[in-house]
Image (cartoon, helix red, strand yellow):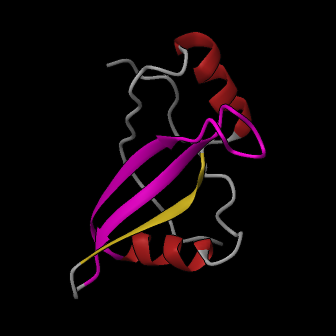
Amino acid sequence: MRLVKENVAIAGVSWNERGVDARNFVLGQHQELQLRREPDNEWGCNAIAVIGIWSNGKGRSKAQLGYVPEDLAAEVALQYGHSVSLYAALRAHSPPGS
């Protein structure tokens, strides 16, 4: 595994209900992140969705939190192509708007 970038802010968190989901993710427990390529995304073929998974006291929740910023997603596609598996690690987080 190779580290491509650290301290990346998720794009699109304020769109639709994602701000609520992002806040619940940050306040939850046992957070995990998944990255999912979206080659058919209408905004760009390099799109990488950021999915949050967390415990909320009632079970596990899963929601799309936003996207890897467009410039970084394009850089990843250029350097590694579209067939390489992507991973994300959560090191620190803060509630949206803080």
Answer whether residue 52 is magenta in the image: yes
Is 91 one of the magenta-colored residues?
A: no
Which quadrant of the figure contains the C terminus? bottom right
* Corner quadrant of residue 60: bottom left
Q: Which residue is drawn at 55% across and 15% down?
A: 81
Q: Where is residue 39 in the image (x, y as percent from the top left)?
A: 62, 35
Q: Is residue 9 above or below residue 63?
A: above
In the current view of this chain or complex, which residue is farthest to the front?
40
Q: Quadrant of the N terminus?
A: top left
Examine the image and state in which quarter residue 69 appears.
top right
Give the total number of marks visible in the rendering: 0
Q: Is residue 8 above or below residue 31?
A: above
Q: Which residue lies furthest to the top in this view?
A: 79
Residue at position x 72%, y 37% in the image: 70
Residues drawn in magenta: 28-56
Note whether 24 is above or below 90 in the view shown. Answer: below
> Residue sitting at 51 percent across and 62 percent down?
64
23 or 70: nearer the viewer: 70
The answer to whether 76 appears left or right of 45 in the picture is: left
Q: Where is residue 44 in the image (x, y as percent from the top left)?
A: 75, 38
Relative side of 96 to 29, left or right: right
> Is residue 71 placed above or below 30 in the rendered structure?
above
The residue lying furthest to the right in this view is: 43
Residue 9 screen position, x and y as percent = 61, 49
Residue 96 lies, in percent from the top left, at 60, 70
11 displayed left or right of 54: right
Report whether 78 appears left or right of 7.
Answer: right
